[in-house]
Every structure is written in structure tokens, then in C-alpha cells.
Amino acid sequence: MKIFLALLPVLTYAGDLSFQIAGLTLTPEPWNKEANLAKLERYTREAAARGAQLVVAPEGFLEGYVGNQGHTPGLTRDRYFAVGEEIDGLLMNRVRKLAQELKIYLMVGFAERRNGKMFNSAVVFSPAGDVASHYSKSHTADDEPFNTKGTEFPVVGTAFGRWGTLICFDRQLPETARILALKGAQLILVPAWGSYGETNDIMMRVRAYENGVWLAFVHPKRCLIINPSGKIVAKDAGEFDQVVMGKIDLTKHTRSTLLEQRRPELYSEILKK
């Protein structure tokens, strides 16, 4: 299967803005948060030593993505709630301090316990240790029985441009990435766990291209860094634990004119159930 990306006029955004991103293609151990945190720290330190300014780990990395009933047969509500972490909990604060120590942006996926509910979330801690971005998965394919679905698509301003987040299955619905692009996202981070392969590679290239954004797909077995033209500029070397380094350059951020060619007044039908 091949993908052909047509050449369209582009808009160029001036400014000196480039940085190194690292995707961590790491497989965590189910339920073992301490072991997974140790692995996260080890590979994050390696990434930072190699110059990474943004480090991204996969979906549900902290607890091993145990909230999916297909991945975890016999999953119970009580056990799942027990493994949950609050965003300012003990282990998440250790992630926060790691970002602060290394002076990097650090994203990790985790089963979040919040106000008596569970969410499949991803948080980015800033070099100052602040919460730079916080997103909860909004589309789950109904295979995460104890997770509450998120309802917002935040785009956040950082020292390295404007970022949005999608988690795994979110990426399969084209509306989600389009919303982020329309809200000004220049980079979409996609921590994931589920399917990967040729079809997914094509899908991620199209999401970047059709929205004129950079995209980072980070999965335990696959990592893709894709530019706004749909070109893969960095990827993993195979299905093993590793750090995948890539350079994102927003100095001459090119955004396809597809957004400018939209005719929203014609699209009301897609909002109907």
C-alpha cells in the first residue's frame, strides 16, 4: 500500500523555534508502577543526555495500560481504582520532579483517579515542574469499562509552540485532530497502546498532512515523528525498548492551506448522530 501526498500551497510562520523530541518506545509491566517508573526514569535520562527537550512515553505507561478489558481479562473496578494515581500523587510527583531536574518537558500516560472517577490521561510536566498539559482520552471504543471519557480538547502554549494531545483510539476519528488544528496546535502528541503497522503509519501521516501539523506517535512498539507535509522524519529501529530522537522545527512552520479551504457551512451533516 502506498500513500501519495499532493503538493499544495502552504503558509509559513516565521520565528526561531526548533527543538529535540524523544519518543520512548517502552513496554511497561502490568500493575508494577514502581518498575515502570524506574524504566521511565532510565530512558528519560538517556533521552535528556542526548539532547531531548520533550520526552513522550506511551499511553497508560505508569500502570501498564491495565484499564482495557481485552488487555486485562478479569479486570475489576476495585483493582483498577486501586492502581489509579492522582495527578499530584506520590508517583506522579516523582515524574514531575524528574522533568524539573532534567529541565525538560515530560509526558507520561497514566490511569488517573480524579473526583471519584477514573480517566485514561496523559500529562506533560514542564521544566519548571508545572502541569503544562493535561488531557483525558475522549474515545475508547467502549473497551475501557471503568474509565470516564474526556470531553475537552485543550491546546496549550509552551516555550516550543502550541501543543495538543490525542490518546490512542482518539487518532482514528479525523475530527479530533482537526479540532486541535483549528485551535492552533502546531504539534499533536499521540501516546498510544493499540494497533500499529502500515495502516497506522499511513493514518498518522495523513493526520499530520491534512491538518498541517507536526505529529508524534509514541507506542510501546512503534514511534513516528512526522512533519506537516506527512513525511516521517524519525522512527523506531524495531520492536524493542529504545529512545527515538527527532527534530521538530517550527522556525518555518508550514501549514497546508486545507484549513483555509474549508467550507464549514456545508458540514452540518457530520454533526448528526
Image: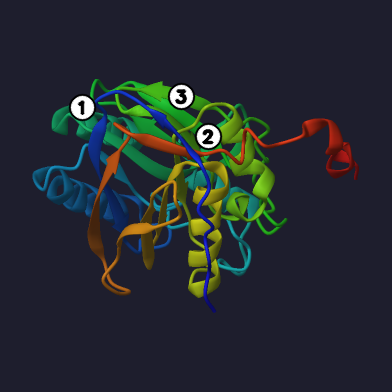
- Residue occupying image coordinates x 68% and y 41%: 149
Q: CA distance from mark 2 to mark 3?
A: 11 Å
Q: Residue at x 37, y 35 (%)?
A: 253
Which numbered disc flags the more N-terminal residue, 2 or 3?
2
Left or right of 264? Residue 87 is: left
Mark 2, other Cα within 10 Å: few <14 / some 14–19 / many ≥20: many
Three-letter amino acid code at disc 1? Gln
Residue type for callout 3? Val
Q: Amino acid at mark 2?
A: Tyr
Tell me the SS state at disc 1: helix
Q: Is residue 188 left or right of residue 240?
A: right
Residue position marked by numbered label 1 in the rendering: 100
Q: CA distance from mark 3 to mark 1?
A: 19 Å
Residue 236 picture location, percent across and down: 29, 66
Q: Position of residue 209 (x, y in %)?
A: 51, 50
Residue holding disc 3: 156
What residue is disc 2 on?
A: 135
